[in-house]
Image: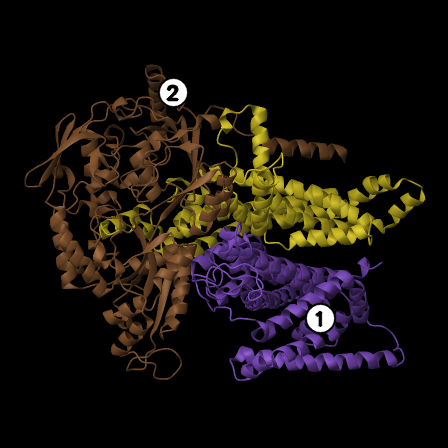
Amino acid sequence: MALGIWAGMLGVLITRPSRVQVALGGAWDEKLAVFTLFVGLLVSWLWSWWDVRRTVTPGRVGVSQWDLAVIAFSRNRTAVAGLIVVVALYLVALVTPLIAPHGPNVQYDLVTMRLVGLSAEHPLGTDQFARDVLSRLLYGARISLTIGFVAVGISVSIGTLLGSVAGFFGGVVDGVIMRFVDMVISFPRLVLLITIIAIFEPSIFLIIAVLGLTLWPSTARIVRGEVLSLREREFVQAAEALGYPKRRIIFRHLVPNALAPVIVAATLGIGNTIVLEAGLSFLGLGVQPPTASWGTMVAAGRNNLLDAWWLSTFPGLAIVFTVLSFNLVGDGLRDALDPRLRS
Amino acid sequence: MNRIVLLSVVTVAAACGGGDSGPRRTVSNEPFCQQVMPAVDAYMAEARAAHPTPDDPRYGGTVVVGGIGELADGMNAAVSSDYQATQHQQFVNLMTLIDYDENGEPRPYLAESWEVADDNTSITFHLRTDVTWHDGEPTDARDVAFTFETVTDPVTAFPNAAFWDHYVKGPDGVEVIDDYTVRIHMQPHAEFLDPFRSVGIMPEHLLADVPREELKQHPFGTQCPVGNGPFVFFSHDAQDRWVFEANPGFPQALGGRPFLDRYVYRIIPEQTTLLTELLTQNVDVYIAPPPDQAQRIIDDPNTELLRYPFRNYVFVGWNARRPQLSDPRVRLALTMGTDRQSIVDAILQGYGTVANSGVPPFHWAFNEELAGGIAYDPDGARALLEEAGWVDRDGDGVRENADGVDLAISVKYNNGNQQRQDIAEIMQAQLADIGVALQPQVVEWATLLQQINTPDLRDFDGVVMGWVVEFKLDDMDLFHSDRIDQPYAWSGTDNPDIDRLLEALSATVDRDEAMDLWAEYQQVIMDEQPYTYFYFPDRLDGVSHRVKNVEMDARGEWLNIREWYIDPESR
Amino acid sequence: MTTYVLRRLAGAVPLILGIATIIFFLVNLAPGDPTLLLIAPGVTDEVVQQMRENFGLDQPVHIRYVRWMAAMLTGDFGYSFSHSRPVIDVIADFLPNTLLLTVCALAIAFVFGIVLGTIQAVRQYSAMDSVLSVVLLFFYSMPSFWLALMLILTLSLSARNLWEWPIWFPASGMNSVDYDYLSLAGRIMDRARHLVLPTLSLSLVLTAGIARYMRGSMLEVIRQDFVRTAQAKGLPERVVVFKHALRNALIPIITLVGLYIPVLFSGTVFIELIFAWPGMGRTLVDAIFTRDYPLVMAGTFFFACMVVAANLVADVLYAVVDPRIRYD
């Protein structure tokens, strides 16, 4: 994988030197792209070096749970494939300003260049406004991935906090929080999303916020379950006996141990969120144009499915493969972290 | 285990298969409907016996028409404004006093003849005597009087109240002279017959006792309408389909019963699905496909595409109350900086004409000389903007005025409408070239309505909207300064020339006299540029070869539905 | 057991009331109200005001809330503006259609999910296991509306026009136009044909999830001692799997019913829109866009009730089926 990253970054550098130079003075996301490029080169080189060094030194004493999990994960080929795709996606998303052949919103001549099929100039065709589909796909990756990542990030944070508090304190606190959790879970999530977004104006911030705020209950439940079972263990009792403040016990002892299923849920959640965002765009409640997200691209192209099939198909495939990769990673993590499922 | 599987399979099969195996149709449980529908059934039985189907192979068959929208408010002509619903009222289930021929000239329908008083202050209609409601009651002058009083009463909230501006409203405006003669009073004004082409006559004997403010919620409209037209209402499954049957008792002089046995209108919200249904011959007529699907319909051997100029147009309304937009030169520059012809070619695939005013090109009032309109002229636009004081002072590509305020304009449009979104996006790209920062903003429909229609609010710079005109053109609600605080005065126009012309035009009865005024009006509109008019899209319809004798034009899709027939070969 | 059920039921009541309250305030605090859609130039302010009064919109929010709550508790859900009928009638019309779709989709998803999951577990690490995993995940990762559109294009349009298969499926609707004229057998066939594509779109996504859970569950059960005992006794594999392992593996799957029902209801919105299925999901979305408050509140309320009920049933079933579980 390191080799792949290294080769990819170098490839970009070699094939687009002028672009890189321009980007150095460009907008912040372009600077970020160049930064990523160099950091990627550096990190992959360093990693290969460390990897080689590690196998040379004699074996260490004992193997931690973490190592066991890593080994189990790396044995699962599909999961590793998924991980590679995910990492590649995020890197590509960061470096997009450098590799996209055209700007995402550049409209070429509306009369001649509209709805042109796959060609050398436009490998994935053009859309109704003579914009390059490939470039929009790449820029759309950033939007969709960002939405997924941030929304899940919000929900995991809130869910972990509330779940651990509920599990640790029990009693009334637990009761109240869990009632609230039940309420939000029983809601048909899509209806809530539609209502809120239809009422206020659809913007990317609102979408992320609402997606995040409707996803946290499942995380909270998971964390609460884990905390409940962990709470009776000796190390927690020891910590309590030592007189550590409750906050420290929660955050430094309980939460890290409860994280495993949370990570699994988060990975699966990102995939789910991307699909939901596509669904919202289908109803016309997604990100506002001209910003491209995969969901809006699929929605905008759906009347042309019979002729200009490339408009909906490529973003649709992109969604499927991205979500698939996230799910593979999540599955692999679950298999690796759960000792009962390893054979 | 096996028993459980067997049980679940049987349950599933029963659930999935069990449907209504009861009576032929389910009547709504509203007391009104329970009372009315048996009378309709009785009438139908009688009419079938009295008028047997002629021995002509064209008679028979079912036609399915598919559209994406439900017929809001159904057959209730007093409250509905939805285009497809009104079409059904005019041509399918109800009857109007007159209708138009291909040249836009009025011809008799429910009214056999009419006279206009010499001073143009009244019309006397002589009604046909052989028309009956679908429950057996004859249609007479009292129905017309009832309809007129109802739609002119503000309590009813008739959506096109502008129709009746120059009529004497309420009971004073209509006189029942005898059973089949009725007189309507008005002030002399233009196109005074037009409202009688679009408003269907409603049954007085069924609805007279209903309080007018409750008419909108009455089950008559969507659950059990009783009309007097060529098709009798059979059933309505909400959001799914309307079913009508041929009326055997329809007057012989008007052609007798329609050729079709049944007519079904299906509601399919997703256009790809609708196209598939047309191509797999589950739907015979596809109402208003988007231009991108047109080629598919043309290519398919079983369908053809009907295309004709129509009377709706799309425009961007500028709110002249906003400081950046108060100068007509700015608005003119915005229009000049947009390549509208290429937008028509791109978005509409050429199925449309660029518009420069609210007068459709096929209309008699259209001024041919102005057909060229405002050309796409980015340099001219830039010059105009400079002249108006908008110059790019800080080199960021966006112009500012003397105070340093950016020429930033937001354009709102409602979600779910791909064409309006397309317009906003293209405008943004093209106007960026001349130094204008146009920001498209999608707003949900109900919220958008509130923002643009509330007189004190007017929370928008520009809005992409569509407008359907009747044959009687009347921009009073849009541009007259007296109505500047009414909901539709989006542009906030206060131009004495426009006021004068609008008033003159609505009072001028003679078309030849009006022609000069119309020419002047269109020129003044171009100078004032309250809107950037985009285009008059051609109306498209996909029709299966199975259905014969379908005529469609600006009057509507259903205009001769009683003359459609199914090709006997393909029954 | 009974006490548990009663306690859950008692707990469900405030839950449902809480949901109803949230819905009410969310919808009513939105900008824009139903009368907006009626505003036209000739419509004077008095008329609009009258309309507002008719709909009860002129009262302050908290009074409306109290009134609405009181009405709801007596079963009066109000009047739908956009349908011009009492809300109860509207729901009675559309809910069964959605339920039909949901139940069929659930049934198919469970049957196929269980079968596929079992196959995967019994043949763990084989080629079939990996292939099935990827294929199932592929469908799980697809947006349901995309899947629906693809299905229409392949199994409806292309099947009939392009490839000329003997069997193809209608792209929309619940039944054909001449449904009323068919015999009973004809009607069942017609319904079934119309159900295929929508159910497939809904259930394929669920099947993958259920198959995965089933696989995990079976794997756990297979490793247990009693299975090994059965194998050691020399029983044929089929007996071991079906008679012994499967029953125990099915237990946690029951809880999935409760988990998947809200997902299912959300998914029906897209399916109903694309297949022109006259169901509750589509009606609810339309009601939100037209600010038809009573319908939105009643519809969401019903959905939430069904979810709560499904969860309760799942939990009870779980306790009934698994003797190890005791709720006190």
Q: Colour of chain C?
A: yellow
Q: Residue at x 90, y 48 (%)?
A: C228
How packed is label 1: few (under 14 Cα within 10 Å), some, or many (20 or more)? few
Looking at the image, the residue that sits furthest to the left is B119
Looking at the image, residue B309 lies above or below residue A122: above
- Closest to the observer, B367 or B187: B367
Q: Is residue B240 left or right of residue A21?
A: left
Q: Position of residue C324 (x, y in %)?
A: 77, 47
Q: Quadrant of residue A155?
A: bottom right
Q: Chain of mark 1?
A: A
- Closest to the observer, B210 or B507: B507
Q: Position of residue B61 (x, y in %)?
A: 43, 26
- Closest to the observer, A196 or B226: B226
- Residue position marked by numbered label 2 in the rendering: B56
Q: Give residue A256's mark.
A: 1
Looking at the image, the residue that sits furthest to the top is B49
Q: Quadrant of residue B545?
A: top left
The colour scheme is: by chain
- Element under label 2? loop
Q: Position of residue A97 (x, y in %)?
A: 56, 75
Q: Colour of chain A?
A: purple
Q: Colour of chain B?
A: brown
Q: Amino acid at mark 2?
A: Asp
Determine if residue C6 is in view: no
Q: Is residue A62 left or right of residue A156?
A: right
Q: Amino acid at mark 1?
A: Pro
Distance, label 1 to label 2, CA atoms, is: 84 Å
Q: Quadrant of the N terminus of chain B?
A: top right
Determine if residue A9 is in view: yes
Q: Residue at x 52, y 48 (%)?
A: C269
Looking at the image, the residue that sits furthest to the right is C233
Q: Chain of mark 2?
A: B
